[in-house]
Image: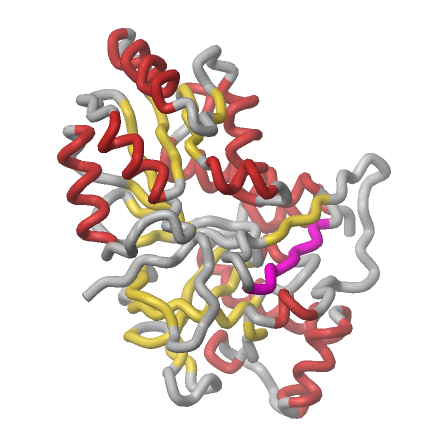
């Protein structure tokens, strides 16, 4: 099965078929992913009949730091472009690695999700404020924003490293033209910009991706959003939930609740028993990302949160002793 066929199936998924599709992908990866298969053998999960999402063994996210997580027998089209992503790797910590054999899958994933939540990216001017990500390279977030900038086609769409004055001038021009704009940035950089250049934004969505990167004192999400709302005079601050180990993103429109695209689902596991998994409630977040067909679709994160009956979820912090990760460093009280 070539990547294009896989993508067509995933991103046109009927929500009613999610469970059956996820179980199908589990059977595929439990057989064709060498490391995932080894993990299942170690925990003796291969002996258990998996008939529901809660019975699926989720791979601890830390293994993306130490092992090559990829499925065998990947059939790609001739012009497939291979991608290699690395996590932000806070100083002194080991980075995660995610091999993506074909860029088509990732591009279709973030493109379809953005279309679903925000409409066609060609309608926007994209202003990306991601200095630390741009400096280190191999960032899945930078790759996504770069594609957004290109597909936007607007002359003002660009990355802004430390050019805060230039960003301010661009936003002023977009506001004067009533141009729909997305300002997406790492949290510390958005706060720096908001303090240096407060500006009233009526036609701009402000979206934070999380992360102080050791540049500023940690703040809870409500505090960050309160500062940004005041400095930019916006009714809400949006947020993106994504990570190197996933090819899909969830979005929050400012109410603290993240919503997933149809090919992604969040479950919750017990803090003390990682094999006790529920579809709702409080605990540690487990993520099913069907776009991860070439690595592992079933990831046990270290993020604490709550999953609501409608499938939306909150992120409230991280497990004790977990490595800090760039896209989820903020804690809520």
| Residue name at image x 23 percent, y 47 percent | 224
Q: Where residue 27 sits in the image (x, y, percent)?
A: 67, 73
Colouring chosen for the image of the structure: secondary structure
Which residue is at 61% across, 60% downward? 96
Considering depth in this image, is 62 or 169 the residue closer to the camera? 169
Q: Nearer the viewer, residue 107 or 26?
A: 107
Residue 36's quadrant in the figure? Answer: bottom right
Give, as a single range, the part of the protein colored magenta: 93-100
Question: Height in image: 25 above or below 223?
Answer: below
Residue 179 in which image quadrant: top left
Residue 262 image position (x, y, % from top left): 45, 52
Residue 310 appears in the picture as rendered: no
Percent from the top left, x then y, of residue 91? Answer: 52, 57
Q: Is residue 138 left or right of residue 231?
A: right
- Whether residue 66 is visible, yes or no, is yes
The vertical placement of 48 against 66, above or below, is: below
Residue lying at 24% horizontally and 24% vertically, measured from the top left: 197
Q: Residue at 29% across / 65% down in the picture?
A: 316
Q: Left of 234 or right of it: where is 109?
A: right
Residue projecting furthest to the right:
78
Numbered-mark total: 0
The C terminus appears in which quarter of the rendering?
A: bottom left
Q: Is residue 98 magenta?
A: yes
Q: Image check: 298 left or right of 178?
A: right
Specify the quadrant of the image occupied by residue 330.
Answer: bottom left
Q: Is residue 226 magenta?
A: no
* Whole-percent x, y for residue 292 in the image: 62, 57
Who is closer to the viewer here, 53 or 114? Answer: 114
């Amino acid at each position: 099965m070539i990547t294009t066929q896989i993508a067509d199936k995933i991103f046109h998924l009927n929500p009613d078929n999610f469970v059956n599709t996820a179980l199908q992908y589990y059977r595929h990866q439990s057989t064709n992913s060498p490391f995932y298969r080894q993990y299942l053998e170690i925990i003796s999960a291969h002996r258990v009949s998996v008939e529901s999402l809660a019975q699926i063994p989720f791979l601890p996210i830390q293994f993306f730091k130490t092992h090559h997580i990829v499925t065998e027998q990947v059939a790609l089209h001739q012009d497939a472009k291979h991608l290699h992503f690395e996590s932000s790797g806070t100083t002194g910590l080991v980075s995660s690695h995610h091999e993506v054999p074909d860029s088509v899958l990732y591009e279709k994933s973030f493109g379809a999700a953005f279309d679903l939540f925000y409409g066609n990216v060609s309608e926007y001017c994209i202003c990306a404020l991601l200095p630390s990500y741009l400096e280190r390279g191999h960032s899945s977030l930078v790759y996504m924003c770069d594609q957004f900038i290109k597909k936007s086609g607007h002359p003002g769409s660009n990355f802004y490293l430390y050019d805060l004055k230039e960003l301010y001038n661009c936003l002023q021009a977009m506001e004067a033209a009533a141009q729909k704009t997305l300002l997406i940035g790492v949290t510390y950089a958005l706060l720096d910009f908001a303090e240096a250049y407060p500006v009233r934004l009526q036609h701009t969505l402000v979206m934070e991706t999380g992360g102080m990167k050791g540049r500023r004192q940690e703040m809870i999400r409500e505090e960050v959003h309160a500062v940004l709302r005041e400095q930019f005079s916006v009714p809400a601050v949006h947020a993106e939930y994504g990570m190197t180990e996933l090819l899909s993103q969830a979005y929050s429109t400012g109410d603290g609740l993240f919503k997933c695209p149809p090919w992604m689902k969040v479950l919750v596991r017990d803090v003390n028993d990682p094999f006790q998994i529920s579809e709702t409630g409080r605990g540690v977040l487990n993520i099913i990302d069907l776009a991860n067909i070439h690595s592992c679709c079933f990831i046990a994160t270290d993020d604490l949160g709550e999953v609501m009956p409608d499938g939306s979820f909150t992120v409230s912090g991280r497990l004790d002793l977990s490595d800090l990760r760039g896209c989820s460093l903020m804690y809520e009280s």
